[in-house]
Image (tube, rainbow, N blue to C red):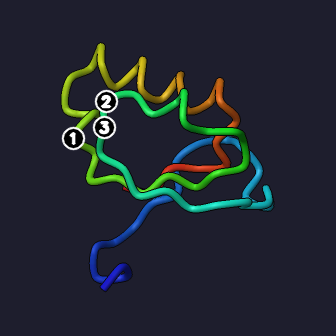
């Protein structure tokens, strides 16, 4: 199913970062819930607005998320 969606890897971060935990969430800001090393799974609802999306992605990066899967 994932392959049928033609997934893309976007970004320049190394792909060998360890994943400590996986969170499924669709809230506009979950950075305060992360401790670092998490892979976040989301439908991307927070990314539909440019300004909110930038804050969302920056919050994940600042919290040390290992990656984001949309």
Between discs 1 and 2, the one toward the N terminus: 2
Task: Give the residue drawn at x 56%, y 62%.
Answer: 22
The answer to whether residue 61 is above or below residue 55 is: below
Q: For this view, does 49 lie left or right of residue 66?
A: left
* Quarter that holds the C terminus: bottom left
Q: Which residue is mark 1?
A: 45
How many marks overall? 3
- Toward the front, the furthest residue is 33
Look at the numbered disc 1 and give the secondary structure of its residue: helix
Name the spot of residue 43 as percent of width and height, x first: 26, 53
Q: CA distance from mark 3 to mark 1?
A: 8 Å
Between discs 3 and 1, the one toward the N terminus: 3
Q: CA distance from mark 1 to mark 2?
A: 8 Å
How dense is the environment of label 3, judged by Cα within 10 Å: few (below 14), some, or many (20 and up)?
Answer: few
Mark 3 or 1: the one toward you: 3
Q: Which residue is mark 2?
A: 28
Please report contact status of discs 1 and 2: CB closer than 8 Å, yes or no.
yes
Occupied quadrant, residue 49: top left
The answer to whether residue 62 is above or below residue 40 is: above
Q: Which residue is mark 3?
A: 27
Name the spot of residue 2 as percent of width and height, x first: 36, 79
How dense is the environment of label 2, judged by Cα within 10 Å: few (below 14), some, or many (20 and up)?
Answer: some
């Amino acid at each position: 199913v994932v392959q049928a969606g033609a997934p893309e890897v976007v970004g320049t971060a190394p792909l060998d970062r360890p994943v400590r935990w996986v969170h499924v969430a669709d809230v506009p800001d979950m950075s305060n819930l992360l401790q670092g090393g998490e892979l976040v799974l989301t439908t991307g609802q927070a990314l539909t607005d440019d300004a909110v999306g930038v804050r969302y992605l920056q919050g994940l990066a600042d919290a040390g998320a290992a990656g984001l899967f949309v």
